[in-house]
Amino acid sequence: MRIVTRPDFDGIVCAVLLCEVFDIREPVKWVEPNALQKGRVEVHSQDIVANLPYDENCALWFDHHYTNRINKPFKGVFKIAPSAAGLIFEHYKDRFKRDYNELVQAADKIDSADLTLDEVLHPEKYDYVMLSMTVSNDGEPDEAYWNMLIELLRKFDIQQVIEDPEVYKHCQSMLVQDEIYIAYLKENTELIKHVSITDFRPFTKPPIGNRFLVYSLFPDTFVNLKIRYEDKKKDRVAVHVGHSIFNPKCHVNVGLMLADFEGGGHRGAGSTRFQATKAEEYIPKIIDTLLKNENNED
């Protein structure tokens, strides 16, 4: 039995819970939703897929993303909710030896972007927020670190996890990166009415940092569009779209919109990855939809 999930904080917590329930020893299979959707991931018959689109080969599936709903029988739980981890926790609530209430509440809060301005600007004051920001799928894969976090969170409380030397190093690195990231955001973000467009395609190695900082820097905008190349080959483009968590006036269902451009996600945030040759067609259409700011759920 193997866990297949994505490398974000919700995915980490999903893995923590599932490892405990099923005593799973196999390494986690870390994948991006777009890769699963396009059949680039081999899912086995005993795999548990969490926080990702459904795959018909899996044994169990747990997810909460708006665009991943299916109309066929499956084993597991799908529900629009703050986090996939919360669904797993509720489903197996009588099978945990440790008290994971606080961890799951943190996953709900962080994955639903229910953060204050102070939590965004000063994550070092909030242990779970800071820890979550060390888990990113924007840079080079860091599977050893992600797997280590699973083991630490299964054994220790958050204060002990934060004090682990490797975690502490990642946290300090993240804080330094955020200072640099702010400068990159200011220099590479264009404002068109209520839409901020951050284009990191000029960079061979795109800068990474706190994904919520852009909303604090451009408080009058409703939504941010971030564009980068997926890797050094520059043959695929990654686009991330998110409603401002401080100026909630965007009416577009982001996940539903991006489903038309090979992606998906939640109502308030989503992403897509596609061949770079499609960028001139896709990106202007996405921007136009965001500028119209119309409810697209009807």
Image (spheres, helix red, strand yellow):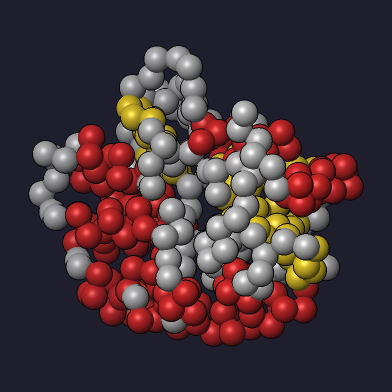
* Residue 68 showing in the rendered view: yes
Q: Position of residue 183 (x, y in %)?
A: 69, 82
154 left or right, relative to 35: left
183 in relation to 191, above or below: below
Q: Nearer the viewer, residue 179 or 241?
A: 241
Q: Nearer the viewer, residue 114 or 78?
A: 114
Which of the image's four quarters has the N terminus?
Answer: top left
Q: Position of residue 259 (x, y in %)?
A: 66, 35
* Residue 23 showing in the rendered view: no
Residue at the spot 77% in from the left edge and 78% down from the top edge: 187
Question: In which quadrant of the rendered view does residue 161 lie?
Answer: bottom left
276 left or right, relative to 48: right
Residue at the spot 76% in from the left edge and 47% down from the top edge: 292
Q: Position of residue 148 (x, y in %)?
A: 35, 62
Question: In which quadrant of the rendered view does residue 91 lie?
Answer: top left
Q: How many marks?
A: 0
Residue at the spot 27% in from the left edge and 63% down from the top edge: 152
Residue at the spot 77% in from the left edge and 73% down from the top edge: 188
Which of the image's four quarters has the C terminus?
Answer: top right
Residue at the extreme top? 72
Q: Position of residue 149 (x, y in %)?
A: 34, 62
